[in-house]
Image: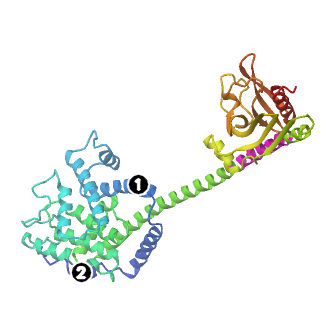
Amino acid sequence: MAEKRETPYEDIAVFAPSAASEELLRQVDDAVREINDHRPLTREVLQKLETDILYDRVHSSAVTEGNRLSRRETIVVLTSGVIEAGSRKDIVEVRNLAAAITSLEEALRESIPLSENLVRDLHKLLLQDLDDANAGRYRTQNVAITGAKVVPPLGLDVPRLMHEVVSSSEIHNTALHVLQRATWMHWVICRVHPFLDGNGRLARLLQDYILLKSTYVPAPLRSEDREGEYYSALEAADCGKGRGLLELVAKNTLRMADRYLAVIREERAKQSWVANITKIATEKVQQTAHRKFLAVQRSSNLLKGEFFKHAGELEGAIPGLSLRFTDYGGIDFEKFQDLTHKGAAKRTWSFGLEFRIGHTALRYIFWHGVHRSRPEDTVGHLPSDIVILVSAEEDDNYYRLLDDIEEDRVSIREAVPSGGLFWRRRYNPISERSEWDTDVSGGEIARTFIQEVLGKLGLV
């Protein structure tokens, strides 16, 4: 059989799509367009793609060259670096492939153009620790491929041919479909056979470089392609019939694009589901919180009304006593939320009372706060976390909680809303402990408090 050593870089037209394959290319374009519509891809999608698809790219390319590791073993090598079986060569090959893929993607991110240096650097990674003497070095001797109808170019011609390949204007000719350009790059590297080993792996890397540079997706071979049409398509391309290889690359690009879309759609569906569930749950929580707020607000207004009514009835009825009631407004929903979630909020005063007789004045503030558990709390779960606390003026305009001062004449310490009634915590000066009353009305709380303050003033 006569040797055929024609220059392989000239005729990219042999990879032009036929009328039948144009529909396949259109499907690829549509899928890639949908992928690009979702860019920038979310971190979750990128992580999923970078891991799973990296494993496929490494495994499929390695298996095509005779690597015996299974996909599971390939994943184990790339994640932990150790497997129980498998030759050193197989293990190093998949590690090197992963490193080369990562380096290629880094070059794309940094907009590094295709060059001989990039090609040699990628090859150096592929053969690292396998054949360091030839890693990244063009072959100088002539080679023949067993069973091939076309013999690779002479070793002396490799540098010139590789220069012409990487500098070819056809690589950047946007009038040609990117799949045509990527397929040609795949084939021409196999055809020139610039290195002694690793040419197939390098060809698929550079094919993916062309695809990814145009925001397409990589096109790893399937394991069954090796036993089926892959080598037949390469051989046909050597003989000027490139559409078979074009369609193979297009089918694998479409297959990978569909995987991208499956991940993207699943992530979007999950995000939509999470957003919907979160919205529903948040609305439910907010509705529940608002109901609790309205209950607290209602109870506060009820208690405030009882104090206002009783203070008004006593004002002017006891000689020399001035009893002034001040309404501070209470809390709004935002402050209620702060109390619920942060345990504190500013300016939550509800109302105040000033008792004055002669030169003596006692002032108290009723305000909203949160319950603080104490050892003597034996009542279990309170009906509300938001409670009404009582502070007394010690110095001019400085108020302290009755819990924090030595006050044994006025017993109330806090009132907890419970429907239309209250739980009341009072200080018992005999036991020197707090005690709880339940189902106490707002009127009872107001009358007891006012009577105790009047007793402190010596009026009752």
Image point (67%, 47%), residue name:
335
Most common SS among magenta residues: helix
Residue 297 inside the magenta-drawn segment: yes
- Amino acid under disc 2: Ser
Residue 402 inside the magenta-drawn segment: no
Say above or below: 408 vs 388.
above
Could you give the CA–CA distance between mark 2 and mark 1, rounded to whole angstroms? 35 Å
Q: What residue is pinned by disc 1?
A: 47
Tell me the number on the disc at residue 394: none
Q: How is the image coloured?
A: rainbow
Q: In which quarter of the image is the N terminus?
A: bottom left
Q: Residue 121, percent across and down? A: 18, 61
| Helix, strand or loop for disc 1 | helix
Q: What residue is pinned by disc 2?
A: 169
Image point (21%, 61%), residue name:
122
The residues colored magenta run 286-305
Image point (31%, 43%), residue name:
80
The picture quadrant where one finds residue 159 is bottom left
| Helix, strand or loop for disc 2 | helix
The picture quadrant where one finds residue 41 is bottom left
* Residue in the foreground of this view, choosing between 248 and 360: 360
* Residue in the foreground of this view, choosing between 131 and 272: 272
> Are there few (<14), some (14-19), or many (20+) residues within 10 Å of tag 1?
few
Q: How many marks?
A: 2
Image point (69%, 22%), residue name:
376
Instruction: Tell me, yes or no, whether the two marked residues, 2 and 1, touch with CB atoms within 8 Å.
Output: no
Residue that extends furthest to the front in the rendered view of this protein: 359
> Are there few (<14), some (14-19), or many (20+) residues within 10 Å of tag 2?
few
Q: Residue 310, percent across and down? A: 88, 38
* Residue in the foreground of this view, choosing between 44 and 349: 349
